[in-house]
Amino acid sequence: MNPTTPFSGQTVDRVDGKLKVTGRALYAADHPVENLCHGYLIQSSIPRGTIAAMDVTEAQASPGVLAIFTPFNPLKLYTPLGQGEGAISGDFIPLLQNPEVHYFGQTIGLVVAESFEQARDAAALVKVNYQAQPAVIDVDAGLGQAYPPKSVNDLSATVSVFADGVSSIDAALGEAEVSVSGTYSNPIEHHNPMEPHATTAVWSENRLTIYDATQWVQGQQRNLAAVLDVDEADVRVICPFVGGAFGCKGSMWMHSPLTAAAARVLNRPVKTVLTRGQMFTAVGHRPIVRQTVTLGANRDGTLTAVKHEAVSSTSRVKLFVESAAHRTSLALYKAPNILVSHRVVPLDIAPGTFMRAPGVAPGMFALESAMDELAVKLGIDPVELRLRNYATVDPNKKLPWSSKHLDECYRVGAERFGWSDRHAEPATARDGDWLVGTGMATALYPAHRSKAEAKIRLQADGTASISSATHDLGTGMYTVLAIVASQSLGIPVDRIRPVLGDSALPLSPVAGGSQSTASVGPAVLSAAESAKKKLIAAAIAGQRSPLSGMKGDQVSFENGELRAGSKSIPFEQVLAALGRASIDGSGTASAGEEEHQYAFLSFGAQFCEVRVNEWTGEARVSRFTSVMDIGTVVSSKTARSQVIGGIVFGIGMGLLEATQMDPRSGWIANRNIAEYLVPTNADVPKIEVELLNFPDTVFNPLGARGIGEIGIAGVPSAIANAIFNATGKRVRDLPIRPESLLTEPGHPNLA
Ligand code: MOS
């Protein structure tokens, strides 16, 4: 049915799987280093003010303590690079350079001791005297100071698209035959990867080697060089394995340069591992977002106006914009009039950052809930309503999409899920004490691609190594690139040796924005072509080569062999005959002219069944079907796992996850994963994932658009829509917990 490429749908076990399950994969805190000592962060316990004094006497005298760095005994740090400079800093300024406190949990010191426990215990003995100042923690209290950021994803804070003769979005909405309007919210959420952030810094001859938990070794390299004031060439960042990241390892956070600076001063390697609790203020979060969506439509369901206004929290000292409206309502439906706007509310809280499907995950909750409300109001099936507003060109850029099969996602998803059997009337299906409902939502995520390089080395033992400074965050990148190399060289995957996660390797962008396959994959293709050409040239030129003296066009590289006439010689034999251990090919790939001619987006449809207990208000997702149009599926197993993981994340966002901040002190009450609720196995039903696998070769030669984030998109709204269908109750605030569904606790008031 679908066109395929040689790269489509390979079913290969994770090539790094054995290393992981046998404990041989080294994460940032695992690298063995001699003479190591340990750092432990001291974090502020007030949200705003000045540190008047820090008494470190007792801490300094406690066993094993080597040094205590504070604003009164600082480590000199310089200004980090900005996002435009090709590296991202998550924190606001180098910390410890002055006694100001801008948020609860800000790093105000680093204790270094012989052991982790000694450093931790000493940190508890440091006495801090603050001169506190009033802080604004609560969004409602801060709303008066909300302002439009200078730019939102390179667009202005308000973007409008109007049909001829329409003067304003409100004029368009005023003329609509029907309209719905709702305000939707999500709380602060935290990434909580299994692997905590960790940094091990080793100096030798003024050169730094740092084992760091990061999504971007080369961004980290540039930023560390800037902050430590050393040459980039003298910093090497190593991170071969990442135990989950979801965006919180995409920027540089200050524990890394502090650790490196401490190691430099102490002339000893230092390792700092963050505790789970410290990660709630030291490495970012998804901001609070409040969105009001107003849809105007004709009675047949055709949208005439979409107004989507978002407000998100930001740290007062470090702007981060969770671009919920811009990334969703400007891209999804065909409506003649669209207005999106964004304002940020500056608060005295820690900096926010990218978290899986930044902007899109909250934005799709609002937009796709509003679409469900419209479907209910009009009595039109939710899938049908979406098809009636199907866009064939990007509504804002007015460019055609490179490849779009969202209609097929809806159709296949509805069929697989059994959508036609649903009870359209809310609160009419039950199973004993459980009210049963179904809901759906669209998924989308932009397709990104950045310049990347890769190297392939054909080796005399018949293997080929491929290298690039990208990462496998658990996403499957080792496997994806092994498949790409295997296919382009025509040799089995088990003879490919991928090497990733070292800043000394060829250029790679941040492993974020779901862009790694689309960026690095084509670079590997190009490197493979280069390696083949070089081998052919060497085989022709080499005097002892079996192909010596032949013409270039007589020789080809196929299935790992050089072929000429009736001869076919495996590449390792050619290398042996040439007396060479290896031959290298390099490749570069980046976007071209197509960038200005097409819009690039991935799509999907999410369908779920939810059961709500009428006595307890407990909502459980009981069935989930997801159909994704994400271009070429290079590695079937890991791609499916990415979507499943995104859906699990979406179940968390929909039903469980919320960071609880005390509005007076900024203190985070649930800084642990016992009380910050994430889905466990018992919360996750059978998830059916179908990947359409239409190669998007306009986007890149591999045809892949990336899959790391789209899985979460639409999931919270599909759940909320199913809960409405089950109970008749529309919940617009995440997470949807029993208290959202019981107006009188303990009473059966849902049906
Ligand atoms: Mo992803 S939030 O771009 O790491």
Image: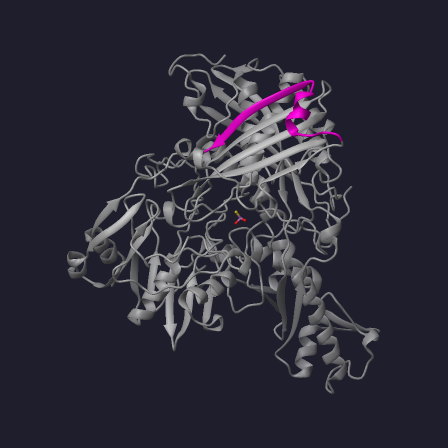
Residue 175 part of the magenta segment: yes
Q: Is residue 15 shown left or right of residue 296?
A: left
Residue 641 figure quarter: top right
Residue 702 figure quarter: bottom right
Residue 229 figure quarter: bottom left
Q: Pick the residue in front: 678 or 371.
A: 371
Q: Quadrant of the N terminus?
A: top right
* One can see residue 477 in this view: yes
Residue 524: percent from left, percent from top: 65, 63
Q: What scheme was used to colour the molecule?
A: one colour
Query: Which range is magenta?
Result: 165-187
Up the image or down, 162 lies above or below 49; here it is above
Q: Is residue 239 shown left or right of residue 121?
A: right
Residue 212 part of the magenta segment: no
The residue shown at (69%, 30%) is 167
Q: Pick the residue in front: 168 or 431.
A: 168
* One can see residue 5 in this view: no
Residue 499: percent from left, percent from top: 55, 64
Residue 402: percent from left, percent from top: 74, 46
The residue shown at (23%, 54%) is 123
Residue 8: percent from left, percent from top: 70, 50
Q: Is residue 130 shown left or right of residue 205?
A: left
* Count of numbered circles on the image: 0
Q: Furthest residue to the bottom?
A: 543
Q: Is residue 405 shown left or right of residue 199?
A: right
